[in-house]
Image (tube, rainbow, N blue to C red):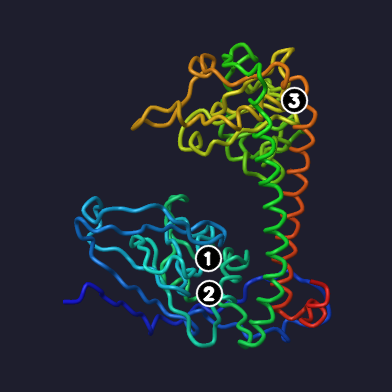
Amino acid sequence: MSDWQQISLGDLEAPVRHKAAVPRQGSRASMSDGYPLRPLGEVMRLDIQRTPMKPATTYRLAGVLNAGKGVIAKGELDGGDTEYAAMNVLRVDQVVMRKLTAWEGPIAVVPAEFDGFVVSNEFPTFTLGPELTPDWMRHICGSPRLWVEMKNRVSGTVQRRKRLAPEQLLQIQLPIPPREVQAQIVEMLDAVDSQIAALEAESAALIRVRTGMVGRSSDTEQTLISSLGVVSQGRGLPKEIQGKRTGDVSWYKIADMTGPGNEFGYTLADTRLTLSEVAENGGVVAEAGAVTFPRVGGAVLTEKKRIVDTPGALDENHLIITPGEKTNSEYLLAVMESFALSELVRPGAVPSLNMGLIRSTPLPWSWSENKSFGTALGVLRAESRALAAEAGNLRATRAALLSGLLDRTIDIKSAKLEV
């Protein structure tokens, strides 16, 4: 028997026909002028190739990022070191999705460099029909419209364990323009993506400059964190008030670290209360300039550090360093960003840090740089935030552009002149 087993699903149950809501982009055309809505099952098919896991054979493992952000390499594994008897194989230009937590949009087109990688059974693959171009489908995978449709079809009782079956994905209806129109749309969206990539590259360069500015002075020495400020832990945010918005005081959770506007400093939390409500529930407001990072769980390994720009309470999953009188908060943040907290985590244990460990941890510290570099580091951080905001605005514009082009409320010729 061949090592390869092919599974195809051509005839699926009749698709559920409904029309997804599409953001309006103008009144130049009506929805009836849009491209026809068709189930994905008419233009692509489930097509899974499996390969057995053989001991002493190395396989390249892949994963799929949320929000249509693409495929990611996850290292290599020996076929004898996995519980899977067989795994799915990725092929270039196929669509691959993650069934688990599909409501987060983990779907992508396989790039050429991932051809031959393997994934678990949680990742079904689909082959595109002749009516779809891979580049066009790549942009569709990055469309919030598709993620909403995926979210509407997941099944399960526990949110984090909800799944999307392959046949449910194929029931999703989307506008399918002719291939020549797909090519024109791809050209415009690629141009926007190039601008986003340039902004992100500039932001990443500024981050490298910031971390590269610290620790090079001749007076740099190992200094205990306890000498730089007060180390404390956040306070638990009661479940019954999570997400409540009755005031202007934020109560930050670890999830807020990646929230809009918080990538370079805490400014706004999902939970916002009055000052009296924070006090009544045991919260303690951290002052502006405090530096914080995750205390426990997988978040510790992400190496995320934030400075508090807008004072607010922090939940119990945060450790906080409140800078002392002689400690510049911007310099402290840059030093913390250049230091890997994951190195302090014991192997095999649930990742965790405690106040005693952090207090006794030495950092490369220069009191002269601390005084002179603080302002410059703050300016660089503000510029990184501005670039991230601009990239975020472009992503929103891109999503609206794609939606408008598909329902034809935006004219392709006019859009090409503006991009």
Q: Indicate the amino acid at tag 2.
A: Ile
Where does label 1 land, which residue? Answer: 150
Q: Residue at x 71, y 57 (%)?
A: 198
Q: Quadrant of residue 405?
A: bottom right
Mark 3 vs mark 2: give the one in front. 3
Report the disc number at residue 288. 3
Image quadrant occupied by the N terminus: bottom left
For mark 3, give the secondary structure: loop
Question: Mark 2 vs mark 1: which is more N-terminal?
Answer: 1
Gap between marks 3 and 1 measured at Cα: 40 Å
- The front one of 315 and 77 is 77
Q: In this view, does 336 lie to the left or right of 408?
A: left
Image-quadrant location for residue 226: top right
Image coords of residue 43 (percent x, y): 50, 84
Mark 1 surroundings: few (<14), some (14-19) or many (≥20) residues within 10 A: many
Q: What element carries label 2?
A: loop
Question: Are circles 3 and 1 on residues that touch, CB within 8 Å?
Answer: no
The structure residue drawn at horizontal position 24% and vertical position 53%, both measured from the top left corner, is 83
Q: Where is residue 399 in the image (x, y as percent from the top left)?
A: 69, 66
User: Relative to 252, is 223 above or below?
Assistant: above
**Position of residue 366 measured from the top left corner of the image (x, y, whole percent):** 67, 18
The one of 274 and 9 positioned closer to us in this rendering: 9
Specify few, some or many for label 3: CA neighbours under 10 Å numbering under 14, 14-19, or 20 or more.
Answer: some
Q: In this view, does 252 lie to the left or right of 38?
A: right
Checking the image for residue 172, the label placed there is: 2
- Between 98 and 28, the residue placed more toward the observer is 98
Task: Using a 10 Å C-alpha cutoff, classify the residue at mark 2 as few (fewer than 14 neighbours), some (14 to 19) or many (20 or more).
Answer: many
Q: Which residue is drawn at 74% across and 12% down?
A: 325
Number of numbered discs: 3
Task: Tell me the amino acid under the disc marked 1.
Answer: Met
Q: Which amino acid does label 3 sit on?
A: Ala
